[in-house]
Image (cartoon, helix red, strand yellow):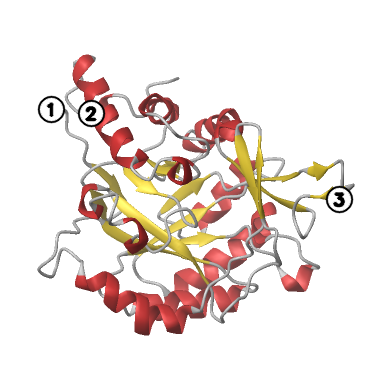
């Protein structure tokens, strides 16, 4: 069998299949369907410094080949994660007696560079968490709600502050709602990011024409699913050729063939998101399908195809 091991900075994944934040809970919710030790990494739901209630309902709507969501980062805050969720995860961690042999990565959100950094610092103290993923698509309250990730300066301000207070692997999740994603990727690299994940959701809208109302409570939301895959592939290709950092590709991946495309475009690993809602076991099927494809094409390692598209 081909070697599926990949490296994200200092983080070694036994296979390149990760779950995307917000689509897999804390992982524990899926353990009846998926042996969690079989995945490369699990990215848990977005965590903020203070608890967040999220947006009003309705906050999810199905669209052709995808879905919209405006959940609004509902979570109980980082202190709750540290005192309640983290101990439960560690009961299943590979350092204990259980079977989980995949990395746990925490997605971190905030509304200022300082709140990002404070949250990251609390997680830095947890020995069982080797990395965080910074969600810089969050609104900058000092800039009238503009997302940090839509300008190189905004992205750099968050990465710079977090890098000062977080010592482990720092992954930055990039927003696609920009003109030039490569300039933002370069800004993150310059401030100390260790890896980049992309893309986050694309802003979209759906309208109920009988009610003459938007289907989401705050009118717009993030579009995910197969509909955004061509955009994600293009951005992964562009970023992988613009920086010297490992890239994690996501956006509409639901089959092994989708994943192979992302690897060829330059991704070192991939995340499975919306597809988890359709098939809780899809991440395992994608992992096995990648292995079969590599064997069928006489590849010794996944590295044989990463970035092969010139």
Q: Looking at the image, which residue is at 52% across and 37% down? A: 242
Q: Are marks 1 and 3 in contact (CB under 8 Å)?
A: no
Secondary structure category for the residue under label 2: helix
Badge 1: residue crowd in 10 Å (few <14, some 14–19, many ≥20): few
Residue, x 38% and y 64% (percent of image)? 26
Residue 229 visible in image: yes
Between discs 1 and 3, the one toward the N terminus: 1
Where residue 249 appears, x then y in whole percent?
45, 40
As measured in the structure, the alpha-carbon distance from the residue carrying label 3 to the one carrying label 2 is: 46 Å
The residue tagged with tag 1: helix, strand or loop? loop
What percent of the width, then of the height, locates residue 231? Answer: 61, 32
Q: Which mark is residue 213?
A: 3
Q: Gap between marks 1 and 3, in whole Å? A: 53 Å
Decide: is 304 above or below 180: above
Mark identifier at residue 291: 2
Q: Residue at x 22, y 23 (%)?
A: 292
Upstream in sequence: badge 1 or badge 2:
1
């Amino acid at each position: 069998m081909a070697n599926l091991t990949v490296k994200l900075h200092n983080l070694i994944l036994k296979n390149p299949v990760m779950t995307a934040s917000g689509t897999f809970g804390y992982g524990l919710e899926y353990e009846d369907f998926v042996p969690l030790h079989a995945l490369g990494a699990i990215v848990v739901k977005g965590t903020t410094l203070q608890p967040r209630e999220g947006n009003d309902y309705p906050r999810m709507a199905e669209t052709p080949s995808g879905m919209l969501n405006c959940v609004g980062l509902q979570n109980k805050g980082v202190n709750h994660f540290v005192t309640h969720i983290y101990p439960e995860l560690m009961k299943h961690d590979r350092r204990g007696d259980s079977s989980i042999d995949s990395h746990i990565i925490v997605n971190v959100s905030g509304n200022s560079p300082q709140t990002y950094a404070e949250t990251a610092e609390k997680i830095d103290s947890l020995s069982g968490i080797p990395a965080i993923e910074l969600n810089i698509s969050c609104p900058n309250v000092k800039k009238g709600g503009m997302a940090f990730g839509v300008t190189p300066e905004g992205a750099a301000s968050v990465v710079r502050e977090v890098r000062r207070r977080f010592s482990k692997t720092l992954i930055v999740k990039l927003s696609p709602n920009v003109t030039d994603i490569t300039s933002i990727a370069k800004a993150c690299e310059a401030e100390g990011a260790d890896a980049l994940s992309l893309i986050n959701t694309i802003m979209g809208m759906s309208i109920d024409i009988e009610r003459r109302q938007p289907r989401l409570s705050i009118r717009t939301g993030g579009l995910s699913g197969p509909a955004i895959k061509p955009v994600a592939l293009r951005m992964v290709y562009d970023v992988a050729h613009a920086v010297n950092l490992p890239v994690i590709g996501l956006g509409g991946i639901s089959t092994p063939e989708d994943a192979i495309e992302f690897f060829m475009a330059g991704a070192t690993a991939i995340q499975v998101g919306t597809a988890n809602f359709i098939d809780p076991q899809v991440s395992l099927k994608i992992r096995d399908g990648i292995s079969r494809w590599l064997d069928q094409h006489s590849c010794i390692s996944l590295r044989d195809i990463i970035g092969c598209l010139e």
